[in-house]
Image (cartoon, rainbow, N blue to C red):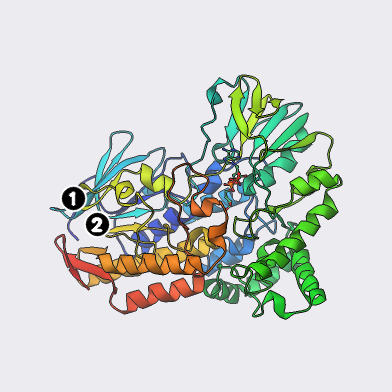
Amino acid sequence: APSRSAGEFDAVVIGAGFSGLYMLHRLRDTLGLSARVFEAADDVGGTWYWNRYPGARCDSESYFYSFSDRLSEDLLQEWTWSERFAAQPELLSYLRHVADRYDLRKDIQFSTKVVAAEYDDASGRWTVRTDDGGQFTATYLITAVGCLSTTNLPDFPGRDSFRGDSYHTGAWPHEGVDFTGKRVVVIGTGATAVQAIPEIAEQAAHVYVLQRTANYDIAGGNRPMDAEDGRKIKDNYREIWQTTRETGFGFPYHIANRTALSVTDEERQQIFEEAWERGGFRLGTTFNDLLFDEEANETAAEFLRARIRERVSDPEIAELLTPRDHPFFTKRPPLENGYYETFNRDNVTLVDLRPAPIQEITPTGVRTADAEYEADIIVYATGFDAMTGTLFKLGIRGRNGLGLQEKWAEGPLSYLGIATHGFPNLFMITGPQSPSVLSNMPVSIEQHVDWITDCLRHLRENGLDTIEPLPEAERDWVDHHNEVTQMTLLPRANSWWVGANIPGKPRNLYPYVGGVGTYRLICDEVAARDYDGFARGTGGAATAG
Ligand code: NA7
């Protein structure tokens, strides 16, 4: 490799969460490349750095929401999770531990935002500019920015006139928030709100929960991990990880090979109940047609509606909490631990925004079409501009100055959700049109990082400088993505998966729903066929491969 001056790297990576940390390790310690990671926060952790709201925890079980045996069998044996679903502080300390163990911090520049990344045709290199005036160049540009990292703060009239304190769950103050004796309005009832509301209600004088859409919340069944749990898992780790790589959602359990209507009503009820008892997303693995067949889906939906009625004492409130406008799992079902019982408390009021939407934020609270809710604190649990929000903020420009946001004005156009035509040597870890948020993230992250690592090794071993998808390969991938999407019920709901939560965002399914196992095979096949569908070249000039 040519010697580089300061500020010149083989690779620039943006983000130091799960993806950025693992990517840096592979680039530097596996491939021997020079790399610099830019991270907006003052520490590693990504999602688990920012989301410090009360009750924040992962909805994937801790023992498979981590780096796998691909990174280190020793780390798996050494690290012990304290709860079945790890809470944010434990996940953050895990990622800090990884950063230290692999000595990653020295190549991460913290508190630095990338404001532009431009590809220069002549040199075949990316120029990256940062908010502190820094300028760097790199052969490869790798985004590791996560899928849920740009918060969505709805533009309610009067929002900034509020005289109390307001917080978005995805940008929570490090010192925490004391809700004791406060009147609190929580806007939103997604996965985040469902975790936060029971904890806030324990402290606050009163909590108003402003709900626009009721969800099918699934019992999480969180509990401490005992020594026996830990031993069983550690004894079986290889098999566990192998299974995560083969299944549809990157979990170590298979979807049952039967349809919901192929069994009797009693059998079905029993199957749902068993899955319910076990907690978490296992409910989604009971039958193989829940995402495809409306009637099958309705059986799961009904099962979940009955659980709500059992737990909420006031039938009218139970009815308001009951989803009826979208099929089960067409919006991300939150996992809950005591959420529904929270509505039996005297200090919690559920407000249905459907008949009376929020009209404005006033200096003293929130005004809907038919009432005003006075508050000391407003919690915005209003989600994220998912998948593309952060990518667009990076100022990425490819060949001939084409902006990524311009190219994707009508929705993402990618090959495998990893690369896009016109942007040579740009790799997007868990980009749109890859399984990403429709999977257990670390499994998908590792798959992308490993694939990118192999790809870079291939380029270097073959004396190639650039790689870029061919337009027809990209068109085929987008067509395939859309076809698979249309086979499912997912387009039926106004979810953030289809961008419906952000005004003006093109409506498409952003993650790929073809399944983690299948997707991995496709990516491996592309690599095995000499990077089929990619043009590769030397000195900036790419040729079809
Ligand atoms: P989500 O799941 O996007 O939830 C956001 C919530 O905020 C949801 O209930 C929205 O209602 C509500 N919302 C958003 N904008 C508004 C406005 N303008 N008015 C009223 N209500 C609004 O975000 P989370 O942070 O909970 O979860 C994100 C992901 O993180 C989660 O899916 C997991 O993958 C982890 P809506 O349903 O759109 O009617």
Residue at image location 34% in from the left, 75% down from the top: 526
Residue 370, quarter of picture = top right
The quadrant of the picture showing ligand 1 is top right
**Residue located beneath label 1 in the image:** 400
* 10 Å crowding of disc 1: few (<14), some (14-19), many (20+): few
The quadrant of the image that shows the C terminus is bottom left
**Residue located beneath label 2 in the image:** 422
SS type, badge 2:
loop
Q: Is mark 2 within 8 Å of ligand 1?
A: no
The quadrant of the image that shows the N terminus is bottom left
Q: Is residue 278 left or right of residue 442?
A: right
Residue at image location 49% in from the left, 47% down from the top: 46
Amino acid type, mark 1: Asn
Foreground residue among 316 and 133 = 316
Q: Is residue 316 left or right of residue 254?
A: right
**Which x, y percent locates residue 508?**
45, 56
User: CB of mark 2 within 8 Å of CB of mark 1?
Assistant: yes
Vertical position of residue 459 compared to residue 384: above or below? below
